[in-house]
Amino acid sequence: MAERYWRGDIETMPREKMKALQSERLVKQVRHVWNNVPYYRALMEKKGVTPDDIHGTEDLHLLPFLCKDDLREAYPYGMLAVPLSDCVRIQSTSGTTGKRVVAFYTQDDIDLWEDCCARAIVAAGGTRDDVCQVCYGYGLFTGGAGLHGGSHKVGCLTLPMSSGNTERQIQFMMDLGATILCCTPSYAAYIGESLREAGYRPEDNKLKAGIFGAEPWTEEMRREIESLLGIKAYDIYGLTETSGPGVAFECFEQHGMHINEDHFYPEIIDPSTGEVLPDGEKGELVFTSLTKQAFPLLRYRTKDICVLSRGECSCGRTLVKMSKPMGRSDDMMIIRGVNVFPSQIETVLLREGYSPNYRITVDRVNHTDTLDIDVECTPEQFSDTVGDLYALEKQLTAAIYNMLGITPKVHLVAPKSITRSEGKAVRVIDKRKKYD
Ligand code: ADP
Ligand code: ZN
């Protein structure tokens, strides 16, 4: 019988006890950072706050924020809080939004990170009897390393596939009877599509669950992947700056991700004023690392936009939940004055029966923003007459207009003409950047 939790004592801890644990850890952590990270100490001094002012999580708001630019400025060693000789690993961000940032880990930091990933795998039904295929990239990217370590901890037979070589992924998946698949949602969709093309039905594989994250994905995308692969698809969230995947994970409710808040303390702030918002309000997620020793970031602004909720969960976990991030604040495009997230467009495409293969191009022509969306049609649609395709484009344009309030130019393109992603998908080309 599968265990329900990896760390039941923590995952179901009464709230008061959790708050006490967090406060105790925070007080220690602030002292650790003050003593060892001159960069952050200077920020605290500038704000007129010292470790003596921090008695518990209720005082957290007194501390200064950190953001990616701070990490770039302090690159590579400026945030290091232990001697380099105590570190056993570095990992690095994917560089999705600019220059890469490196993070350092002691052995204890690695252990707690892998422990968080083990919690995610167990929440997705994983046990020592499972065969866990890890096709997140291995190497500097945290996806492969994190899930790999978690899978070992749980005792799954781990297939360290890394990303790419989809034919081999499928061969190993089928030959070795993989039961859990870990990769980005866009790669899961690609693997599912490739399986179907190779003549497999969803019931031909032994997969029962997938643990997908590292990029935004919609509920519609979840249903698409679940039906392609015949599995339950679980979300997992994390970022290199806090450790990697496993900061938050979904349980069987598939409704928000439980945050491992014994290690990562979350706040939601108004991104423009920095004011802390109450639970239930949408804003930017900020994390304070309560336990990590080598790279302990306090009040790190993730730029991810989501909502926190503390309602009871039927899985029994008391850990606070974060909603699926709808994208980073930097993913948000302002087109003709309207805020647009790629995830809104993805929702419409899948709802209208198209595949999750699309590309968004934004440009500026005669001082007006343009929004072009290339969408793959099915082989059947593609063999239709030009008139039929035109009618489909018109219909899709109207559906997107209903969602966004602006009219895009939709182009139905040939099946397979949009490059598939093996890691984080690049969905948007914003050509306006050259005018800035
Ligand atoms: P980079 O910032 O260069 O992409 P990372 O590889 O550390 O570096 O990626 C972390 C970011 O990936 C997060 O801040 C978030 O924007 C995104 N991300 C990770 N997991 C998820 C998820 N489950 N849903 C949406 N976005 C996610
Ligand atoms: Zn739950």
Image (spheres, rainbow, N blue to C red):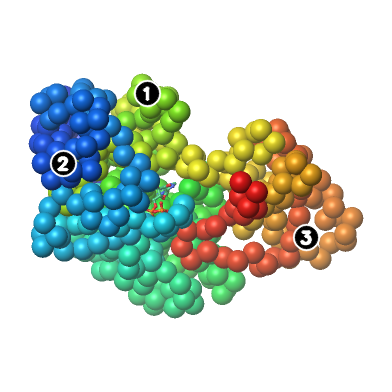
Q: Decide which of tag 2 and tag 1 comes sooner along the chain.
A: 2
**Which residue is denoted by mark 3 in the rendering?**
381
Which residue is more in the foreground, 300 or 10?
A: 300
Where does residue 98 sit, x and y in percent of width and height?
Answer: 45, 54
Looking at the rendered structure, the secondary structure element under dot 2 is helix
Mark 2 or 1: in front is: 2
- Residue closest to the eye, 51 or 362: 51
* Viewer-nearest of discs 2 and 3: 2
User: Which of disc 3 and disc 2 is earlier in sequence?
Assistant: 2
**Does residue 135 sit above or below 353 in this rendering?**
below
**Neighbours of disc 3 within 10 Å: few (<14), some (14-19), many (20+):** some
Q: What's the residue at 61%, 46% (across, down)?
A: 436
Query: Disc 3 vs disc 1: Cβ atoms closer than 8 Å?
Result: no
Residue 276 seen in render: yes
Task: Identify the mark at residue 33; answer none if there is no mark.
Answer: 2
Quarter where residue 206 is shown: bottom left
In this view, the residue in front, 123 or 201, is 123
Nearer the camera: disc 3 or disc 1: 1
Q: Which residue is mark 1?
A: 275
The kind of residue tagged 1 is Glu
User: Mark 1 falls on what kind of element?
Assistant: loop
Say left or right for 162 vs 435.
Answer: left
**Residue 28 disc label:** none
**Residue 234 position in % (x across, y down):** 40, 49
Distance between the alpha carbons at the discs numbered 2 and 3: 59 Å
Question: Are discs 2 and 1 less than 8 Å apart at CB?
Answer: no
* Residue occupying the point 31% across, 39% down: 66
Q: Is residue 13 left or right of residue 307?
A: left
